[in-house]
Amino acid sequence: MTRSEGDKLLAQWDAVPTERQDYYRRVYQREVRAAGASTDDAAELDVLRRLIDAYRQQALVPVGSRWASVPERVRAAARQGKPLDAPEAHSDVTRPSGPPKALALLLLPLAGLLLFGLFALIGGSRDEADALAALTTPTETLTPTPEISPTPTPLALEQSDPVIRAGDSRRRNYYPVLLQVYPADGSAPRVFVVQERAVQTADWHFDPNPDVVSWVSGLLVRPVLGLPFSPENRDLLTTLAPGARFALQMNTGAVLDFTYRDTSQVARQDAAIFTQVEPGLALVLIGETDPEGALTETRWVVTAAYPVEQEVERLRAGELAAIIAPGESSAIIGLDDVRLMVVGTMLATPETLPADLAYALVDLEIVTDTVGLQTSGVNWTLEDAAGSRFNPDALASAQGAFGALPGNIPPNTVLTVTLGFLAQRDLTDARLLVGVGSDVTVFAVGFTLPPEPPTVEGLDVQMRRVSTDATAVYVEARVFNPQASPVALEALENWLVLGYAPLPLGPQSPPIAGELPDSVGANAAFDLALTFAYSGEPYGRLFLLGREYALHINEGG
């Protein structure tokens, strides 16, 4: 590349707005980091060459943390400097969420400027100059494109929607739709349609099409995807190595990037692959059979890690909503005159609920300004760590310390309400999603299962003495409460059943003297003395503080 050509490119680059220069640098640096070329000039140059080659073949442009293809007609208009003044006959977009046409038209003339700016940053060697010289050819105006290039798999690109809808859909608001696998050697990536499947028994039902992976329903922290067996799919999994990458595209258009961790064979009955303790990805080869036609005893499993630094790019691109911490006030996106703050949470476990369920209660402080709030126009949703979502429940809200959410909140009002949801009893970390139209404000909420209330069963009852005379049975005991809270005793009743055979059956006689206190305090004790009527029977059954004692009364004892 000659000096005059470089000067022209530099002049054009200087004309680009500063914020767009920063955006291009971030995109380029992200691709360099993903390729592990941050400290190696030769590797970075190789990334740059691949970006140029990829643009020539696919014409992708960056949009946030994603890449989308630009139609040929838009590229032609950009090269010729003509306005885009006619409707598109068709679109070559290779992803469900492409960029607006005006944005694509803006990006194309700036592509060479970005690459030249990067060339200037890394020093301008002879090899780099040769690579960048391609930008000055009259036949193409090149746009920086990632190593990520769409696969030619026709099903994944053209017929994915019917396959996705044919799965075991749970009508979620957030789920994966496409998986892209990028081998470390830079060979052509594979793209798979993602279909939701509910695995409720030992059988994992799946679509046998080798281009369709089965996502285990609800697993979002660490998605588990089943890859149907085929020789090609087995070769793909067993040859993946460090440097391989995975891109999981969600139905919202967001793309989650993962980096290869390891490959292993696990027993078919091993359930550890389904754990959700940390973000990541598990890709499992399913349906492989041995020569006799029986399922193999082991499965190939590839795991991948989730680089957290991509969250910054996704936030900048608007793909992630900022999460408001408990105790922090925030305006509601779409309702600038309303502020919200989570002031408390708790799990209520009334006896009427099944043992695995609880009422998740969220106390909210709502502040309105000069405009009131029609709460019916707001979506209130609780989402757990696995992605399951719950809508408000009237019975749950009634368990709270504050009133339920009213239909209308007047202007200039500060109101505390309780939103209740029926959820799993083991719920811990969750998010409250407050949606207005397509806008969502996200609040972090945490729950702790309340400790079991102290019970009579937790008392320490020491039977000290049982004695009789001709007319009475005398019971003396020492009662201690080792629990951290008082225990109520007023509802308890104590009885004695007397008879002429061991463990007699008969009427239950209450004490004729002595009584229980109303309660016993935490770490407190008391002496108990009760007297029951007696007529000389040799056997008895004593019911005391929920316990039963068998009595054998000796004459004169």
Image (cartoon, grey):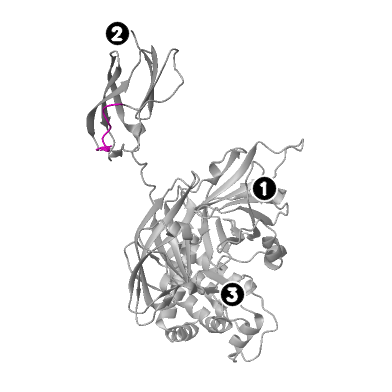
The amino acid pointed to by label 3 is Gly
Q: Is residue 506 magenta?
A: no
Q: Is residue 514 magenta?
A: yes
Residue located 63% across and 66% down the image: 150
Residue 319: in sight, yes or no?
Answer: yes
Residue 119: in sight, yes or no?
Answer: no
Question: From the viewer's perspective, is 428 left or right of 69?
Answer: left
Q: Which residue is mark 1?
A: 234
Q: Secondary structure at mark 2?
A: loop
The amino acid pointed to by label 2 is Gly
Q: How many labels, in total?
A: 3
Q: Which residue is mark 2?
A: 556
Mark closer to the chain start, 1 or 3:
3
Of badges 3 and 2, nearer the viewer stands: 2
* Dot 2 alpha-carbon crowd within 10 angstroms: few under 14, some 14 to 19, many 20 or more: few
Q: Is residue 539 positioned above or below 194 on the image?
A: above
Labels 1 & 3 near each other (Cβ < 8 A): no
For the record, the magenta segment spans 512-521
Mark closer to the chain start, 1 or 2:
1
Q: CA distance from mark 3 to mark 2?
A: 97 Å
Residue located 47% across and 57% down the image: 395
Residue located 64% across and 71% down the image: 94
Q: Secondary structure at mark 1?
A: helix
Of badges 1 and 2, nearer the viewer stands: 2
Q: Is residue 545 positioned above or below 552 on the image?
A: below
Relative image position of residue 514 (x, y in whole percent): 26, 28
* Dot 3 alpha-carbon crowd within 10 angstroms: few under 14, some 14 to 19, many 20 or more: many
Q: Which residue is mark 3?
A: 98
The amino acid pointed to by label 1 is Arg
Name the residue furthest right.
Answer: 292
In-front residue for pair 148/165: 165
Relative image position of residue 103 (x, y in whole percent): 54, 82
